[in-house]
Image (cartoon, rainbow, N blue to C red):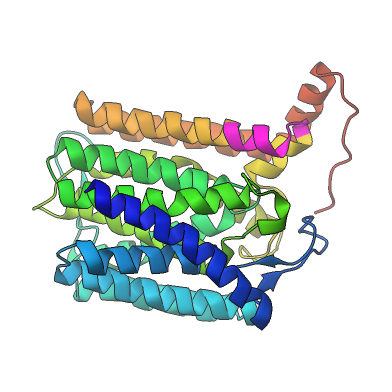
Amino acid sequence: MSLAILTTFLLSFVLLFTFRKVAKKINLVDKPNERKHHKGAIPLVGGVSIYAAILLSSLIYLDNRFEDALYLGCGAVLIVIGVLDDKFDISFKIRLFVQACISLAMIFVAGLSLESLGSIAGNVPVSLPAWVSYFVTVIAVIGAINAFNMVDGIDGLLGGLATVSFAALGIMFMVNGDTNLAENCMMFIAALIPYILLNLGIPLGQRFKIFMGDAGSMLIGFTVVWFLIRASQDVQTDAIRPVSALWFIALPLMDMATIMTRRIRKGHSPFKPDREHLHHICQRIGLSSRLTLVFICLLASAFAGIGIAGELYNINETAMFIGFLVLFAVYFYTISHIFRITAKVRQWLGKEPLVQEPA
């Protein structure tokens, strides 16, 4: 196991440097604009490098089963459509169509779907009819993919939040005795670490900076939901209960749902980019980019820790589900009144009040 993880780490590092040169030659770069305040053209090859490292390590070390081959195939499709989006800015409708097709492949080829919601409404397990299960699975996959795509707003954040989710899943797979899936999660973390370092400018500075790109954010969201469904729905795995999956991705999920609701209420497209995400709000309060990263990742770790504790101590599923709904309600209320709240916080910190951005 350690050799596969080490190889993935080294491959990711080498491929990041290799692909960044290719990206500059083919102009697969992110340039500053009114929403993006970075300096210079940054290569968008984080996702491509991570996928290639995982693919090569899997082919070398792992005894890939049919489900693993399907995952790698679906990942390749997402990487291709993501690179095309990064390069040509394709319509979100095309992305959604591809994501829906990937979801259907999970359901009808791999046999992975959200058939059970667990005992979230009392002591009786809630099982979904087949057609409802298929619909919910498609929504869940598309939701997870876009949730991780939307949090990719400051250096290190997407990688940090993904690492939290994969670490929580890896722990539960290991506790359950499924070393193969635990190894898969650790390999993904190993592939993420070189990207996070270069994305933050560590240790080589801003000259070698890399961005994940839509290819990477879609791959990460898909990978997380793939493992969550396998962990909570596969009878051979059965590592976590469905309610714990909500806690493992609580922050990206709540941020996406809140932001999309606010956009719709304003009459905007739910997919229209803006600067109202949690990381933007933290920076408005006065936190630096690095402090914002640390704060959000610690918050996500706390939520994932609740999910792990719920599994280890067998906390009632209904109580965990109600707790998640209460957390989401508090989060939604806070974000909905964020300008008032940030004004008070900045006043308490002795900073000048901010002018509210126009809707």
Q: Residue at x 44, y 33 (%)?
A: 301
Q: Residue at x 47, y 36 (%)?
A: 300
As displayed, is residue 198 above or below residue 319?
below
Residue 224 seen by the camera: no
2 sits to left or right of 178: right
Camera-side residue of 265 and 115: 115
Q: Which residue is most to the left?
A: 236
Picture coordinates of residue 47 (x, y %)? 49, 65
Task: Look at the image and give the residue range highlighted in magenta.
Answer: 285-294
Q: Quadrant of the C terminus?
A: bottom right
- Magenta region includes residue 291: yes
Residue 342 seen by the camera: yes
221 sits to left or right of 195: left
Picture coordinates of residue 194 (x, y %)? 50, 51
Q: Residue at x 64, y 59 (%)?
A: 264
Camera-side residue of 150 and 167: 167
- Magenta region includes residue 84: no
As displayed, is residue 144 above or below residue 309?
below
Picture coordinates of residue 21 (x, y %)? 62, 72
Q: Residue at x 48, y 44 (%)?
A: 161
Quarter of the view holding residue 330? top right
200 sits to left or right of 304: right
Secondary structure mostly seen in magenta is helix
As displayed, is residue 346 above or below residue 155?
above
